[in-house]
């Protein structure tokens, strides 16, 4: 067996002595630092204006009613709403389907595309995967309305074979987690495949060559070398997709309008928050749902961060 020496941990010099604190990596001069601050300043200002301040205002609304502090009463009232638990179940089931299919299929497809040795074929595959991602969310749902309607769909034969005769049959509430997963995967997987492909390119050719010389099969190479080195990227994909999945709104909203409310208007938590705010004029209840979603998303994202060792240095 060829022995591959693991890379020295960050901050450790080859002689075994640790570098002095504050001298890790390449130090930036003052000019580079100024440009760095300049580049991040725009994002920081937008984050404060459209992320942090609205969140703080939502926290204020969630714990008050008509300007008076009411503790957790708004949360209790929302949790006792007969529409809340079904909306939680719908979103949880969709996020489960979405994350599992995304992580498994994107990683497999990225490894397969990365293994294509014919350059034009690999480039074409990445381009074809990426094209659906260029279509905005609402537009992709409208496109899928035709795909899911057995009377006009290009896959009508398959839909008829599965027993569906109309769009209403296809978008029955029990089918929606799978329908939304298919729409989200079609629209979002291509971009992640390209990102994973770039991450695979960063794996040292020496490591891949050593595995080949040792007689490792493609599956063994993927399982023991490529997957561990993709862990941080998979974790990052999980966090971003989790944040998008818990905010399910456009897809059920468009399908509800297209099917005359066969898809309920309160299918997801974001839709329920929308109804609280703009149908019931109850912004405190809407803010309570938003804060609940935020806390759950942060908690699950923390799991991805620590399990994927996202912030650890190689």
Image (spheres, rainbow, N blue to C red):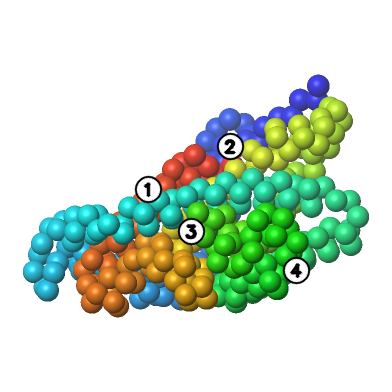
In what element is the residue under mark 4? loop
Distance of label 1 from label 2 (alpha carbons):
29 Å
Q: Position of residue 142 (x, y in %)?
A: 60, 75
Q: Residue at x 85, y 51 (%)?
A: 116
In what element is the residue under mark 2? loop
Q: Residue at x 25, y 58 (%)?
A: 81
Residue position for label 4:
154
Mark 1 or mark 2: whose residue is earlier in sequence: 2
Mark 4 or mark 3: whose residue is earlier in sequence: 4
Task: Judge by depth and name the residue closer to the eye, 97 or 238.
Answer: 97
Residue position for label 1:
299
Give the label, 1 or 2, closer to the camera.
1
The answer to whether residue 44 is above or below residue 288 is below
Residue position for label 3:
173
Distance of label 4 from label 1 (alpha carbons):
41 Å
Mark 3 or mark 2: whose residue is earlier in sequence: 2
Rendered-image quadrant of the N terminus: top right
Distance of label 3 from label 2 (alpha carbons):
51 Å
Query: Quick one: label 3, few (<14), some, or many (20+) residues within 10 Å?
Result: some
Q: Position of residue 269 (x, y in %)?
A: 37, 61
Give the label, 4 or 1, closer to the camera.
4
Where on the picture, by quarter, is residue 190? Answer: bottom right
Query: Quick one: label 2, few (<14), some, or many (20+) residues within 10 Å?
Result: few
Q: Position of residue 27 (x, y in %)?
A: 55, 56
């Amino acid at each position: 067996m060829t022995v591959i020496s693991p890379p020295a941990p960050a901050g450790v010099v080859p002689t075994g002595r640790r570098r002095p604190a504050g001298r890790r990596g390449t130090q930036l001069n003052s000019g580079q630092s100024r440009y760095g601050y300049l580049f991040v300043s725009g994002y920081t200002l937008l984050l404060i204006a459209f992320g942090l301040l609205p969140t703080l205002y939502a926290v204020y609304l969630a714990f008050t009613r008509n300007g008076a502090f009411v503790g957790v009463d708004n949360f209790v009232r929302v949790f006792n709403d007969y529409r809340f638990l079904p909306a939680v179940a719908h979103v949880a089931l969709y996020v489960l389907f979405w994350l599992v299919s995304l992580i498994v299929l994107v990683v497999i497809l990225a490894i397969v595309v990365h293994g294509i040795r014919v350059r034009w074929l690999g480039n074409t595959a990445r381009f074809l995967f990426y094209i659906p991602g260029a279509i905005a969310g609402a537009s992709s749902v409208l496109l899928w309305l035709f795909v899911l309607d057995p009377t006009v769909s290009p896959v009508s034969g398959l839909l008829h074979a599965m027993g569906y005769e109309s769009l209403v049959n296809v978008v029955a509430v029990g089918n929606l987690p799978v329908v939304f997963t298919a729409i989200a995967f079609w629209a979002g997987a291509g971009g992640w495949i390209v990102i994973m492909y770039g991450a695979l390119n960063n794996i040292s050719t020496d490591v891949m060559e050593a595995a080949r010389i040792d007689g490792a099969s493609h599956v063994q190479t993927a399982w023991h070398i490529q997957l561990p080195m993709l862990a941080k990227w998979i974790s990052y994909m999980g966090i971003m997709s989790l944040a998008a999945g818990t905010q399910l709104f456009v897809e059920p909203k468009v399908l509800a309008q297209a099917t005359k409310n066969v898809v309920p208007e309160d299918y997801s938590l974001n839709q329920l928050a929308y109804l609280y705010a703009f149908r019931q004029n109850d912004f405190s209840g809407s803010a309570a749902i938003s804060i609940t979603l935020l806390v759950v998303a942060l908690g699950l994202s923390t799991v991805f961060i620590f399990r994927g060792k996202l912030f650890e240095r190689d």
